[in-house]
Amino acid sequence: NCGQCVMVCPTGALREQDNLREVIEALADPAKTVVVQHAPAVSVTLAEEFGVKPGKDIAGTMTAALRALGFDRVFDTAFAADLTIMEEGSELVHRVRNGGTLPMLTSCSPGWIKFVEQAYPDFLPNLSSCKSPQQMLGAVIKTYYAKEQDLDPRNIYSVSIMPCTAKKFEATRPEMARNGLPDIDAVLTTRELARLIRMRGLDLNTLEPDMADSPLGQRSSAGKLFGVSGGVMEAAVRTAHYLIAGREMPDLKLQQLRGLKGAKFARVGIDGMELGVAVVSGLANAAVLLDEIRAGRKDLHFIEVMTCPGGCIAGGGQPLGTDIEAVRARMKALYRIDRDDEMRASHRNSEIQQLYTDFLGEPLSEKSHALLHTHYAARTVFA
């Protein structure tokens, strides 16, 4: 499902499953409230589809374009990345303090999840039970947001714009539905969004940058880092440190976890406790590490795995012809956002705090588990 085959196909014969038709039909249906979310990696990539050199962040322009295309609400998936960190960071702290299954493995990359289900099912207990940001936001939109806005969830059509073809598979998993309603109705890749913009004749240069809708639109730069390998870990450690020590990390940047190296390791000290963490991108590198753990390696508490080398910025739904320099430029763009942002930790997001106050209660609460967490099971290679 990861889509890397599409990226390297020498004849251009391979394509992702196209979901443009159903999205266009939904946009034309007056009975539907069509909402859209966009992933962190998309805003630093989309401009390349229109001749701009790699590394330019156009989040505001993209939001304006989505409104011009007819979407009724535009949300930022990085908000849900902050929500994921609140749940995942709390889950990590709970496992460490209470003797839970370690090392804990991240669960936001759907190609990685399917790989574990098929090739390493003995590691299923290690996976975080958290849904991905895409699915968390989908669930919150059709429950909390629908109630707040007096909308019938059955009339909400929820679309996500992702750098990843595996997100299409993830959205169709039976675990990702509630009361017969899927969290997400359709997933478009970065390439598909670019095609839709061209089909409608939009000129991005003429659009005034706009902000995502609120609530569910505010994000920290930690949430934005989800687009790059190591970003989930950096975001999680920032919040885990706060949850354990009650104060912010003295240095929020974890340089040893940054960059394009396929496997990165660090020791993180938190209030007298030392956590062993690892960041892996590319499933071949993940397999090596899992084999080491099977063989007895015990120095790791938390492992981030991204299916695509470099993370979502190099996803299978990104522009064809992506090369290593383009990936580096996208990575640097996300690091710049984090460097310059005033709110750099997920737990500082006031809209996240309000969501817990008004609806969820607290991380890992019964309602949080019902909406934001899931489970996985072993499957055969052809399932």
Image (spheres, helix red, strand yellow):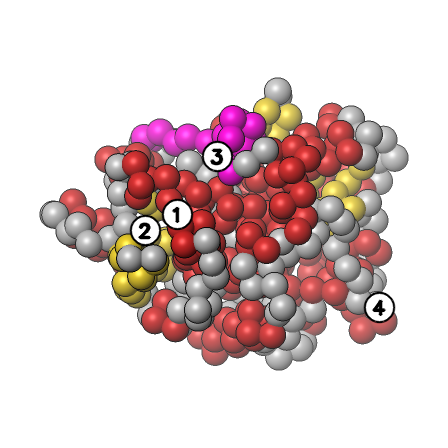
Q: Secondary structure at mark 3?
A: loop
First in sequence, mark 3 or 4: give its number: 4
| Percent x, y of residue 65 | 79, 60
For residue 260, side relative to residue 81 (left or right)? left
Q: Secondary structure at mark 1?
A: loop
Residue found at x 37% / y 54% = 304
What is the spatial separation of the Cα atoms under label 2 and label 4, in whole angstroms? 42 Å
| 60 over 325 or under it: above or below | above
2 and 1 marks in contact (CB < 8 Å): yes
First in sequence, mark 2 or 1: give its number: 1
2 and 4 marks in contact (CB < 8 Å): no
First in sequence, mark 2 or 4: give its number: 4
Q: Secondary structure at mark 2?
A: strand
Numbered disc in front, either 3 or 4: 3
Q: How many marks?
A: 4
First in sequence, mark 3 or 1: give its number: 1
Residue position for label 4? 208
Identity of the amino acid at label 2? Phe
Numbered disc in front, either 3 or 1: 3
Residue found at x 60% / y 33% = 360
Magenta extent: 363-379
Which label belongs to residue 106? 1
